[in-house]
Amino acid sequence: MVRWSIFLGLAVTSVTLAVPRADGYTVTVAAPALQKAVEAYFPITRENALGVVTLSHPRVILRPGSRRIALATQVKAAMPDQPPVTGNGVVDGEIAYDPARHEFHLREPRVASLAIDGVEGPFAALIESAVDVLTQDQFPVILLYRLDEAVLRAAPKLRMLKAVGIRDGALVLELAF
């Protein structure tokens, strides 16, 4: 019996729940489910005339009270005639809801921090700019969550993302009709 309880506890941590309310639904997406969704899109690489930048090994960061999801990533940059450099960065984004597809994505990403080993000044600014362009292009593509069929059958006209929050290590989304 104890094993079953432990199994149920582990299963619940990654399951999403939809709680109906008179004016909409509240959906809670646990951090492990978000982590799994995000990992499917990495590594992300962008190449341009200035070089190649790759973001890899994302780790979802949910900050209590925030409306944004942060991703800590490893960063690798390779510029022509320069040895490749590596470091770490944190990029965060707001949650966007597409009511036609019933999907949640990241939008308006911004580089919150970037530390590249041994790189400073103009070269560091160039790498940060490349990371910014990469996230502007790729973050809206990252599907964080799609409303499940049971919720859509019960409430097919969920049109608006009313509120976003981080509580108890999970993303809480309040949807309205």
Image (spheres, rainbow, N blue to C red):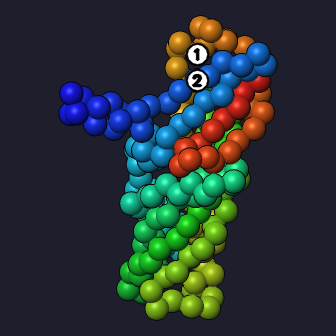
Looking at the image, is 77 positioned above or below residue 24?
A: below
Q: CA distance from mark 2 to mark 1?
A: 7 Å
Q: Nearer the viewer, residue 85 or 49?
A: 85
Amino acid tagged 1:
Val
Taking the image as shown, residue 132 lies to the left or right of residue 157, namely left
Residue 93 shows in this picture: no
x 42%, y 44%: residue: 32
Residue 66 appears anywhere in the view:
yes
Say whether marks 2 and 1 touch (CB < 8 Å). Answer: yes
Residue at screen point 60% across, 13% down: 152
Camera-nearest residue between 146 and 163: 163
Question: Who comes first in sequence, dot 2 or dot 1?
Answer: 2
Dot 1 corresponds to which residue?
Answer: 151
Name the residue at 78% across, 19% down: 23
Give the residue furthest to the top.
153
* Residue 55 higher or lower than 38, as above or below: below
Answer above or below: position of 159 versus 62.
above
Instruction: Give the image location of residue 72, x and y in percent.
Output: 50, 64
Q: Which quadrant of the rendered structure holds the C terminus?
A: top right
Q: Which mark is residue 43?
A: none
Three-letter code, disc 2 = Ala
SS class, disc 1:
helix
Left or right, residue 176 beside residue 54: right
Q: Any mark on residue 18, and which?
A: 2
User: Dot 2 lies on which element?
Assistant: strand
